[in-house]
Amino acid sequence: MVERLPRDPQRIVRREADDVEFIVINHTAAPPITPLQTIAAAFHRRLPGILYQFFIASNGAIYQTQPMLEAVDGKVPYIARAINIGFAGEFNDDIPTPAQIESGRQLIAWLMEEYPQLTLASIRGVNEFINHTSPGEQWLQGRRWKDVLINAVRTGEAVPGDGAVPGAKGQPSAGVEMEAPGGEDGQSRQEVPDAREQPSRGERVARPQIRDISYALPRHPTLQYRRRQLAAITHIAVHHTALPPHVGPEHVAQTHVDEDLDRGKSAWSGIGYHYFIPPDGEILQTQPVELRTHHVDRHNSYAIGVAFAGSFMNGSTPTPRQIHSGARLIAWLVQEFELQLTDVLGHHEFSYNATPCPGSDWLEGKRWRDTLMAEIERVLNGIFQYHYVLFPSEESMAKTMAEAGSYFDEFKPGAGTLLEDALQARFVTLVGAGTISSAEAERRLADAGVEIDHLDDSDAISATQSLLQLAHDGRRFRSLLES
Ligand SMILES: [Zn+2]
């Protein structure tokens, strides 16, 4: 397909196999039936050719659209250092078809064999590099098709003898170009479960919102951390940065990279922590978890490092937002790596690590370990995962729960006043949202893909009446169908 698309070969940048660091996922943001020629022509107006190395049509057909070792830009990381895959369609409301996910899975599995440096952490959306909608709002939020795709790749790897890898090794373009473009949506080439039907919420802890800044942090010009198998990961080490809370990951990365002869510290390849949580609670990925970084001496080969910005000594503890997101991150990691809560330890709880980290108030004083662990447990138990009733205040919650006890006894929804918790749920009954307007809460819930049940009115008295009526009718929701 490469030679049949518009391109200026002399302006295209050649690269080495070692330069490939990422698999970057795009959506075309065009109707799925848009011919590949049209898409390539649109790119060709501003670039030397189509951005994608591969294109996956809505029926799952895979086309190679650029040679893998040629890129349309030599500087921008998500182009120069990546294999780009374009999925036909716009995924702001919907996600790719099961046939597309299955083809994406096969293609990525095959690319990971071709380029051994690629791992699951190398799979990123365009919007994880730049401020852009591609590959659609449903990539990281809502139906989170990033999780769907990565889970498919991960599960596929675990299935031995799956002979469905596209293309003979060494001749990808011959193998992956299967059908003429622009055809109708066909049936999937093989039966795969409809990814959209799989519960990504409910029984499972949802992947929290994580912003990957790992590729942008200072790193050593020559040193490189070794890779480790994901299966080797058995523990999570909690750290504090031992710096003022506003000191961010760039500064920490630089101090980790630099040699410090006075402290007897050698130069490191890059920041030691895999995740970094600043006071505002944003979750930052600072290293791929596959890297055996330095953060807990003698235990680096199997521990993931999660750093909370701040110095938690003498009565100082992380902010509630740090606890909130840290707990969601750690609960999700515990689930993904099949760990136990007892595998989550403060840095100094690991043997041979005589350090105050993560602060004197971890096990003593304010004991923020207990706060964090209780929250992790709450998330893992999934009490808010399926259905959450969001109240405007503790007072209105107490009153409604007392008066509409039969509803809460019957359906046992989670209940509270935190929009952050509601955002983790699959269904939310919205009574009110405290400091922000119901409309604003509704917008944010809808953005996160949460389905909202509306009661008759938002004041507590009629909420009580609505809930009592629902309990009487044996229905959990007024305006939603329970699936
Ligand atoms: Zn530490």
Image (cartoon, helix red, strand yellow):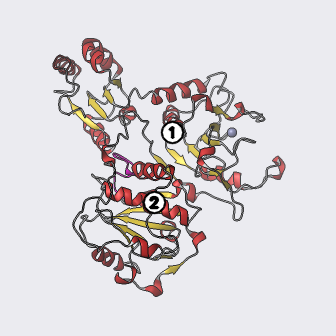
Determine the image quadrant of residue 128: bottom left
> The magenta stretch spans which residues?
135-145
State the image quarter where residue 240 is shown. top right
The main secondary structure of the magenta stretch is loop
Specify whether residue 112 is painted magenta.
Answer: no
Q: Is residue 132 visible?
A: no
The correct choice, above or below, for 243 with respect to 343 in the image is below
- Indicate the quadrant where residue 398 lies: top left
Does dot 1 land on a helix, a strand or a loop? helix
Quadrant where the C terminus sits is top left
Q: Look at label 2 and name its amino acid.
A: Gly
Q: In the rendered view, does 363 fall on the left or right side of 92?
A: right
Residue 222 horizontal/vertical position (percent): 71, 65
Choose between 166 and 101: the one closer to the eye.
166
Q: Is residue 265 left or right of residue 15?
A: right
Disc number placed over residue 329 in the picture, else none: 1
